[in-house]
Image (cartoon, rainbow, N blue to C red):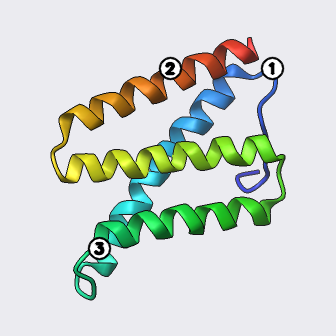
């Protein structure tokens, strides 16, 4: 059921762990693509963000879930990718802002599913 879209209505814990996994996935995609492009591009981080955004967006589209669920999953993946960029460049203020923003979104999402 890993590749089956689900918005976890009524299951706050499932939704929370699903979105946390999407954040980690974004970090992983960013790291992997950055390493792949580090030898062939002068701007591997920009390439990693572009590939993360469009690659995962296309993947979500192919799964065929609801539009809102797909956008939410994509947003959490991109949050993870942007956090990885901020960490790579040691931008602590951006990292803190992302943690607070994602934390707030997670709290709202959990509250909606209780």
Q: Quadrant of residue 99?
A: top left
2 or 1: mark nearer the eye: 2
Residue displayed at 41% across by 52% down: 81
The image shows residue 105 at horizontal and vertical percentages of 55, 25
Residue displayed at 40% across by 57% down: 28
Residue bearing mark 3: 44
Residue reaching furthest bottom? 40
Q: Quadrant of residue 42?
A: bottom left
- Inter-mark Cα distance, 2 to 1: 19 Å
* Residue 26 relative to residue 97: left or right: right
Image quadrant occupied by the C terminus: top right
The image shows residue 104 at horizontal and vertical percentages of 50, 20
Q: State which tag comes first along the sequence, 2 or 1.
A: 1
- Inter-mark Cα distance, 3 to 2: 30 Å
Residue displayed at 46% across by 53% down: 26
Residue bearing mark 1: 10
The image shows residue 47 at horizontal and vertical percentages of 38, 72
Residue bearing mark 2: 104
């Amino acid at each position: 059921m890993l590749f089956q879209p689900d918005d976890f209505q009524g299951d706050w814990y499932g939704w929370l762990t699903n979105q946390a996994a999407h954040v980690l996935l974004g970090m992983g995609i960013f790291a992997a693509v950055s390493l792949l492009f580090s030898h062939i591009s002068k701007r591997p981080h920009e390439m990693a963000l572009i590939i993360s955004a469009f690659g995962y967006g296309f993947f979500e589209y192919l799964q065929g879930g609801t539009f809102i669920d797909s956008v939410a999953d994509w947003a959490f993946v991109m949050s993870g990718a942007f956090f990885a960029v901020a960490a790579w460049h040691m931008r602590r203020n951006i990292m803190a802002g992302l943690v607070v923003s994602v934390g707030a979104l997670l709290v709202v999402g959990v509250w909606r599913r209780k």
